[in-house]
């Protein structure tokens, strides 16, 4: 995970509902360095997104997709632990988030 402010410019689509003009447009914007290649690949695949943060080693990062889904970014040690767990052992993230 990179530090706050360690960014790379990536061309991203700003969706119409996030645009001040009401029209979708493309712009180059600062993306956290460690997830910039992933964000770039999503954009090249025309997978629209609303925002992203790597978590900067302080917590779980995320890439918020335009369709409402959320990709969670875990640091490698947490990712390894998650993958080593059986489904029944994994924390119930959905249960914790749903009202
Ligand atoms: Zn990072």
Image (cartoon, rainbow, N blue to C red):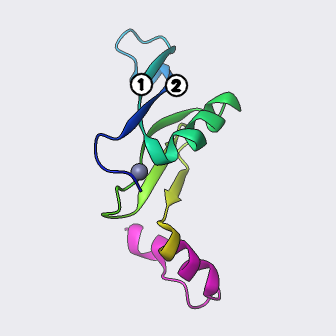
Q: Secondary structure at mark 1?
A: strand
Q: How far is mark 1 from mark 2, CA to CA?
A: 7 Å
**Residue 58 drawn above or below residue 71:** below
Residue at horizontal 62 percent and vertical 30 percent from the top: 43
**Residue 38 at what x, y percent from top left?**
59, 43
Question: Mark 1 packing: few (<14 Cα in 10 Å), some, or many (20+)?
Answer: few
**Residue 6 at what x, y percent from top left?**
34, 41
Splitting the image into 4 quarters, where does residue 20 fall? Answer: top left
Q: Is residue 74 magenta?
A: no
Residue at horizontal 47 percent and vertical 16 percent from the top: 27
**Residue 18 drawn above or below residue 83:** above
Residue at horizontal 55 percent and vertical 72 percent from the top: 79
Q: Is residue 84 toward the left or the right of residue 18 in the image?
A: right
Give the numbered dot on residue 58. Answer: none
Residue stretch in magenta: 79-99
Q: Nearer the viewer, residue 33 or 39?
A: 33
Q: Nearer the viewer, residue 57 or 53?
A: 57
**Residue 99 drawn above or below residue 49:** below
Question: Mark 2 packing: few (<14 Cα in 10 Å), some, or many (20+)?
Answer: many
Q: Is residue 88 toward the left or the right of residue 59 in the image?
A: right
**Residue 95 at what x, y percent from top left?**
45, 76
Give the numbered dot on residue 29. Answer: 1
Q: Is residue 85 magenta?
A: yes
Residue at horizontal 49 percent and vertical 80 percent from the top: 92
Instruction: Kindly indicate whether the residue at mark 2 contacts the one at mark 1 (C-beta within 8 angstroms).
Output: yes
Quadrant containing the N terminus is bottom left
Q: Secondary structure at mark 2?
A: strand
Q: Nearer the viewer, residue 9 or 70?
A: 9
Q: Which residue is mark 2?
A: 12
């Amino acid at each position: 995970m990179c530090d706050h402010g360690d960014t790379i410019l990536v061309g991203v689509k700003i969706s119409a509902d996030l645009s001040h003009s009401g029209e979708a447009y493309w712009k180059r914007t600062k993306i956290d360095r460690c997830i910039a290649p992933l964000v770039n690949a999503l954009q090249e695949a025309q997978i629209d997104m609303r925002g992203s943060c790597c978590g900067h080693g302080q917590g779980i990062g995320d890439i918020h997709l335009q369709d409402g889904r959320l990709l969670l970014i875990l640091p490698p040690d947490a990712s390894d632990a998650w993958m080593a767990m059986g489904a029944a052992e994994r924390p119930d993230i959905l249960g914790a988030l749903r009202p």
